[in-house]
Amino acid sequence: MTAAFYIPNQDVSIMNQIRTIVGGKAQWSIRRSRSFALLAVLFVFSFALPAFAADPLPSWNESPAKHSIIAFVEQVTTPSSPDFVPVPARIAVFDNDGTLWGEKPLPVQLYFALDRVKALNAQHPEWKTKEPFAAFLKGDLKNAAAGGEHALMGLIMATHTGNTTVEFEQIVTDWIATARHPQTGKRYTEMVYQPMLEVLAYLRGNGFKTFIISGGGIEFMRPWTEQVYGIPPEQVVGSSVKTRFELRDGNPVLVRLPELSFNDDKGGKPVGILQHIGRLPIAAFGNSDGDLQMLQYTCAGGGARLCLYVHHDDAEREYAYDRQDRLAKLDKGLDEAARKGWTVVSMKDNWKTIYPRQSEITAIDILLKPDATMLKQAAANNARLLAVYPTGFTLDAAHTPHITLLQGFVRTADLDKLYAAEDKVFAAADVGAMKLEAFKFYYVPTGTTGVAGISAKPTPELLKLQADIIAAAQPFMVETGPIGAFTAAHDDSATDEAMIDYVSTYVPAMSGEHFNPHVSTGVAPRDYLDQMVAEPFEGFVFSPAGAAVYQLGPFGTATKTLKEWELKPVTRSPAGAAAEPVH
């Protein structure tokens, strides 16, 4: 997370600091200056508090279901609460199909399998008469699913194996980027549930680590879950096939075999949790009887627990199904929830909206992800600050260390063009070979606390990269945008306006001679931070290891991953021109 305001001199007033940041331009209006001052104060407090000041679940109607989530989070994150849970033990697990995104008429992975049947059909003439392949080839989805789980498992084995893990990951990545739902026409990644995205963000903002525990294929989900949900691949648990190590042309590969290794469904879910996580969750979210054992396992623990079912009862905006459904029955789970007082969410009554609203404008943050050297230093400083201020933020998937290069508004329809343009910049610049020097601690003061971080020197190479990134983005940028361009609004219009003002003027105010590259590391009392920044700083050199485009959320935080790049060394031709990145 990058602070919206970089203010290195804590001895100057907030207003003077902001005036310094924007270059002391007299034409800036009093209204805008006041908005920036308000935003600076509110933004810092957003770090210091366990959650954003805005409604953490804005797509939820006021209801017992919403209140149960908020009450639970407050219960386990308030230090004075008898049910307080330390950050490392704040584990929340989520089913995927039907809980985080749609699963009707068929689970998404079966549509992927259908396209794989079509792609591989020429190699398997027997599929024309063999079920469920024949039904899939005819587009008869009802009969394709009639064979139940056994037939569908055979389909998965035939279409998901025989390749290496790297090959399969690329097939999934290419497919998920363009595939669309046959009824809505939306990309499958646009059919995630906005209310559940808010739950994920709310939990992570309060120190939770979020995991997917799904009956779907683990290697089908891992290529895209971080971009869509903010859940990295190492926090995805799913069903898997057996793999075999081979050397092909001297290169080590893992080959996917047509044999089930682990079925992460029903009773397999608690087993997967134990094997992959090693901690008992304190919150579990599902939508079918296939999740029942996961919820039972979670709520069997002591202390405060949250077990929640998403009930699909909205035939108008999505689908309605429960006790009689063939593939995603919710029968025993409803009965158990009633007996044990678990939370049951009515999609029809409790959710204001189902899918994310697609604004014509998107507020973006193009950033660099530092290498292990900076990550280690940032984590050490974060641990130090948490020791003196436990309610500060933890560096995790929700607060990823990074250096912002550009914030701005772009046309949503042009996002793919933006990615392509920036891809050329990163490919040509050999960013992974850059050497950046961290040279001091800093903090942004407000009240009795401040947001601290590590500053890096703006080298000529880094300044050129920022200029090139801005130039590549310029054709797709617009002067300003609405609050709908962000992942969520604040709870007051003044803060919304201040955030829009800040992002709208990022280029003149925070680039070039005004660029202050830094990594935010935590929150602590000002008197402690005064001592920390006065200490001798042992400088170190680090490099960028990755880059990404994020959608901005409340208070200018990098909230939703839109596009990522792994920065690899660039080979050079004898004439000095950049060649393809080394893979």
Image (cartoon, grey):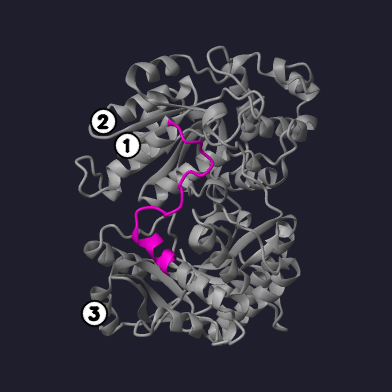
Quarter holding the C terminus is bottom right
Cα gap from disc 1 to disc 2, whole angstroms? 8 Å
Element assignment for label 1 = loop
> Is the C-beta separation of discs 1 and 2 under 8 Å?
yes
Quadrant position of residue 11: bottom left
Per the rendering, the mark at residue 384 is none
Cα gap from disc 1 to disc 3, whole angstroms? 38 Å
Question: Mark 3: few, some, or many residues within 10 Å (few <14, many ≥20)?
Answer: few
Q: Is residue 216 magenta?
A: no
The region drawn magenta spans 41-63
Mark 3 belongs to which amino acid?
Answer: Gln
Q: Is residue 219 visible?
A: no
Element assignment for label 3 = helix
Please tell me which residue lies in front, 28 or 310. 28
Question: Mark 2: few, some, or many residues within 10 Å (few <14, many ≥20)?
Answer: few
Whether 346 is drawn above or below 498: the answer is above
- Residue identified by numbered label 3: 531
Camera-side mark, 1 or 3: 3
Q: Is residue 351 visible?
A: yes
Q: Main secondary structure of the magenta part?
A: loop
- Residue identified by numbered label 1: 282
What is the x, y in percent for residue 79?
Answer: 22, 50
Per the rendering, the mark at residue 301 is 2
Mark 1 belongs to which amino acid?
Answer: Ile
In this view, which residue lies farthest toward the top? 324
Whether 371 is drawn above or below 18: the answer is above
Mark 2 belongs to which amino acid?
Answer: Gly
Quadrant position of residue 354: top right
What is the x, y in percent for residue 372?
Answer: 41, 66
